[in-house]
Image: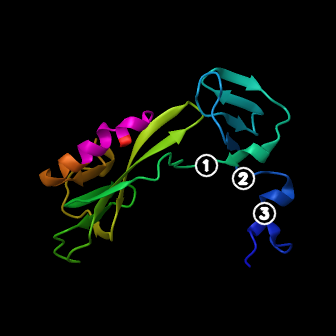
Amino acid sequence: MSRLPFQNPNSINAFQFGVDSMTRYIRSWNCSCCGKPVIYDNQEQTINCGCGKTKATFINLTMFKPLPKYDRNIYDQKIEVPIDAAKFVDPDTQTLWISDVNSIFKGNENPRLVLSYVYYPKDDKTQLKLAVKGKFHMEKLCYNLKDPHSWTERLWIMIPIEQIDTILKYVERNPHKLASWC
């Protein structure tokens, strides 16, 4: 049976120094008044839900589960659609990162767009997250005459027109209404 990092007596981690790496926790059930998730922030020592924010110095965390610091996916259902290309420019290193179906250098790098909904409890915001996965290659910006620091765009995602319907069906779902997911 494997041990968790904080169960290993030889490992040094945040728990040994009294600092919890997870600062936000979500209660197992929603607020009975507003119906929104109940979030406890152990750094600020507050409880937050749709009713407002309340100071709470002692909370029994047995009914709470930790929320990761980033990308709090609120639904397991994600969609992954093939795209033609994704490009990102890094002006500091003068490079362009590219994942392309028809790359003349690397062949098919299988770029895919992943859509999912994430929740940020601090401002009680639900957001649509777009992520690109696939193999990437790097090209130096040697053919450009314009300084990349002055570019107004830094990221390009080329979506084939055939995938637009799939993306729109996912985006039309309201993550706060269960009926829209059936």
Q: To which quarter of the image does residue 57 belong? A: top right
The numbered mark at residue 69 is 1
Residue type at mark 2 is Ser
Determine the CA span between mark 3 and mark 2.
Answer: 9 Å
Instruction: Judge the density around disc 1: few (<14), some (14-19), many (≥20) Cα neighbours within 10 Å.
Output: few
Q: Write down the residue under mark 3.
A: 13
Q: Could one spot residue 151 in this view of the protein?
A: no
Residue type at mark 3 is Asn
Circle 3 SS class: loop
Residue beneath the point at 29% across and 62% down: 112
Q: Write down the residue under mark 2.
A: 21
Query: Was residue 105 drawn as part of the magenta stretch in this picture?
Result: no
Q: Position of residue 32 (x, y in %)?
A: 65, 26
Task: State whether residue 63 is above or below residue 48.
Answer: below
> Which quarter of the rendering shows the N terminus?
bottom right
Task: State whether residue 92 is above or below residue 168.
Answer: below
Q: How many tags in the picture?
A: 3
> Which quarter of the rendering shows the C terminus?
top left
Instruction: Judge the density around disc 3: few (<14), some (14-19), many (≥20) Cα neighbours within 10 Å.
Output: some
Q: Could one spot residue 132 in this view of the protein?
A: yes
Q: Position of residue 84 (x, y in %)?
A: 19, 61
Query: Of callouts 3 and 1, which one flags the residue occurring earlier in the amino acid sequence?
Result: 3
Residue beneath the point at 65% across and 38% down: 29
- Do labels 2 and 1 touch, CB within 8 Å? yes
- Do labels 3 and 2 touch, CB within 8 Å? yes
- Identify the magenta region: 167-180
Circle 1 SS class: loop
Determine the CA span between mark 2 and mark 1.
Answer: 9 Å
